[in-house]
Amino acid sequence: MNMTPLIKPISWDAAVFGIPAWELLEYSEAALQQAAITRGHHTIRVDPLADKQLLHEYGFYYCDTLIEPHCHPARLRATQHHDATISKQVDAAQIMSICHGAFVYGRFHRDFNLPRDAADLRYDNWLKQLLEARQVYGLYWHGTLAGFICYSDNSLILHALSGQYSGQGLSKYWWSAVCGEIFAAGHNEVKSSISATNLAALNLYASLGFSFNNPKDVYHHLVT
């Protein structure tokens, strides 16, 4: 009898980490049993209030809690500044330099079973793909590249600032501009996904009028 697949391969992560990578399609003992006999790195996302006993019994360990900021046009508290501009005309090398090592809150960086340099490479590769698709806004302050925001449809999916511009209160201007572009393209909502531990991003989104929903605890497991 064929067993119904309850885990799916994640080729993107497998290529970066050099081992098979999988995501569980449901939180059930059957899915956990399939993961237990399948070599590789496994990810599962579960409701924060779910009983975690089975996860611990099968060797899964906590890595992160993700939440989804979302905002409609009427709720956006947009802020403009003539010295804070955005453009899709970007220098790829400069953008890549800002990206490398910037994502310390990422669940792959927090996973003690994975090498940090490979976790950095995962984000670098993702950014390269987004640059090729022209889904990257450069963030400029007085004409100098200060960071970037990547998007897909109405979702902000990857963003970072150069260290000297972090914590300066400038992000609200750039995020306002990118949200405005997404709304102007016909979307009625802007969304994102952030780690609950990334307080700077959480406070930024809250200051712009975003609400938060759909929290998910993320657990990993490495089967050798």
Image (cartoon, grey):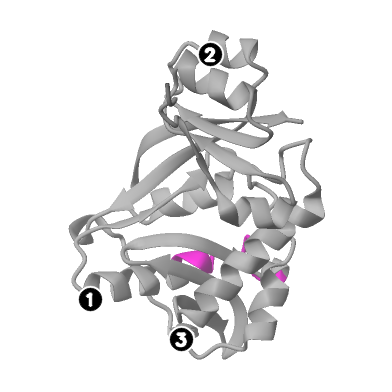
Q: Nearer the viewer, residue 71 or 45?
A: 45
Mark 1 falls on what kind of element? Answer: helix
Residue 102 visible to an observer of this rendering: no
Q: Residue at x 56, y 8 (%)?
A: 53
Q: What residue is pinned by disc 1? A: 184
Q: Residue at x 72, y 62 (%)?
A: 121
| Crowd class of label 2 (few under 14; some 14 to 19; many from 20; radius 10 Å) | some
Mark 2 falls on what kind of element? Answer: loop
In the rendered image, residue 35 lying in the magenta stretch gets the answer no
Drawn side of residue 150 relative to residue 76, left or right: right
Q: Amino acid at mark 3?
A: Ser
Q: Earlier in the sequence, mark 3 or mark 1?
A: 3
Q: Nearer the viewer, mark 3 or mark 2?
A: 2
Q: What residue is pinned by disc 3? A: 87
Drawn side of residue 92 relative to residue 24, left or right: right
| Crowd class of label 3 (few under 14; some 14 to 19; many from 20; radius 10 Å) | some
Q: Nearer the viewer, mark 1 or mark 2?
A: 2
Whole-percent x, y for residue 31 in the image: 49, 22
Q: What residue is pinned by disc 2? A: 52
Q: Amino acid at mark 1?
A: Ala
Q: Which residues are magenta?
A: 164-172
Q: CA distance from mark 3 to mark 1?
A: 15 Å
